[in-house]
Image: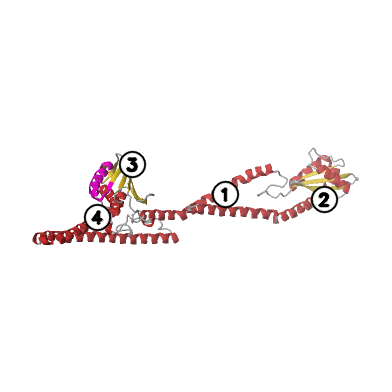
Amino acid sequence: MRSLFCKLFLSFLGITLLASFTTVMISYWAQVGPYGELKKRAEHNQIQALTHSLSVIGIAAVKILENGGKEALVAYLREVENQHHSRIFLLKEDNSTFSDRMLPQGAADLAVSSRKSHDIQYNVSKTEIIVALPFFTTERQAMTLLGSTARMVRPRVFIGNKEENGWQRLLFFRHRLGLPIIIVVLIAAAGCYLLARSLTAPIRDLRKATQQISKGDFSARVDHFSRRRDEIADLSHDFNTMAERTQSLLQSQKRLLRDISHELRSPLTRQNIALELARKRFSDAEPYLARIEKESGRLSELIDQLLILTRLESNVDNAPKEPVRLDKLLGGIIHDANFEAANQDRRIETQNLDEVKVLGSMEMLGRALENVIRNGLRYTAAGSAVEITLSEDENSVLIVVRDHGPGVPQEHIEQIFKPFFRVAESRDRDSGGTGIGLAIAKQAILMHGGSIEARNAKKGGLVIEIHLPLL
């Protein structure tokens, strides 16, 4: 799991659910522990209170029965039931009652047991408490006063009663706990999502800005944390400060290169004029003058390439964009390069040149492709060829240029597109070039929305792949 958002979200959700589960278990334990003791005391008090009430009610019931008869007794018992929120029955010796109401389950047996023992008997079921009190009327007739009241039941918070089977527990869990658990999970998930998002969103913005800078856009800034007063806001402020400083340094560097290049043009122009004048007056100095002219030409070429590179890096290329036939553009470059390489026992071979069109600057695309091809000709072995292929897929064009030279050490493969970078072992200044050609090629390709990569071929040599979007 590499996503920081997923790690934070799942961690917060797990902690929240664990805390909720622990709270439920503590609540349940409190009910089966301290609440259990309280429940036993409450049941004992219920039995004592019901027994005391039955003692008083029994005396009154016998008098009412003797003086007022059956109807008065039934009315009295109903009144008592309404006052005490209990059910009261007066049983004869044969367990018959003075009303037509049904006795609670097990009440008849409890009454018989009470008469036989001549003592109070009680029974505690799942839902009620039944107390049987034996007594005699003034005529020595055996009777039993039986009272029933609702029992204090422990609420089922987490687990059902032990008597329930697995299916009953499952139904209880589904109907009683299913919806609360779902609600708890949804609330916890929503809260954890918002919390994780608030922590990772600034990091994602920082990452986007970093990616923009890595692609050369040093104007990228993070401007969404002005209301925050935490470490992430401090990090964004430091990032913006770093980006501004880096952008300022790079702009100063580019300005310096541009200014130096412009300043060198005028002395070079005057030097070339002086060179022509010296040729007319000192004909015997021709070899020295030719050498000066050659070095002057190299310096002029270097200045031209520096100016082009600075213009590309600053994204100020004003060349018009037009449909460009890459196959024709490559054909012209290959023809000229083959003509120049013939004396060096090197050549260019094309394996496939499909008809492909892209939108861009013919001048800049031409410079990029020519620099890559001439770089391959410069380093390919004598008697070998530089192989070029041009193909297309649904969305892009692929240009592959491969030479048969010594290649580039793997640790330097990503640096060959940097200005003035050279690998001393095989690509020193004696091999020719200014060290800016591939840097110009990369900037020109990037300007057209493409990409350029280099890799070593398995059988030796360097392979450069160029991807460009189709028209």
338 is within the stretch colored magenta? yes
Q: Earlier in the sequence, mark 1 or mark 2?
A: 2
Of residues 292 and 447, the one drawn nearer to the viewer in this rendering: 292
Disc ID at residue 89: none
296 is within the stretch colored magenta? no
Across and down, in percent, residue 358 comes to 29, 42
Across and down, in percent, residue 69 comes to 84, 41
Foreground mark, 4 or 3? 3
Q: Which element carries disc 3, helix, strand or loop?
A: strand
Tell me the distance, in whole angstroms, between the alpha carbons under discs 4 and 2. Answer: 118 Å
The residue tagged 1 is 184
Across and down, in percent, residue 388 comes to 31, 45
The answer to whether 70 appears left or right of 27 in the picture is right
Q: Earlier in the sequence, mark 4 or mark 3?
A: 4
The residue tagged 4 is 305
The residue tagged 3 is 391
Disc ID at residue 55: 2
Which three-letter amino acid code belongs to the residue tagged 4? Gln
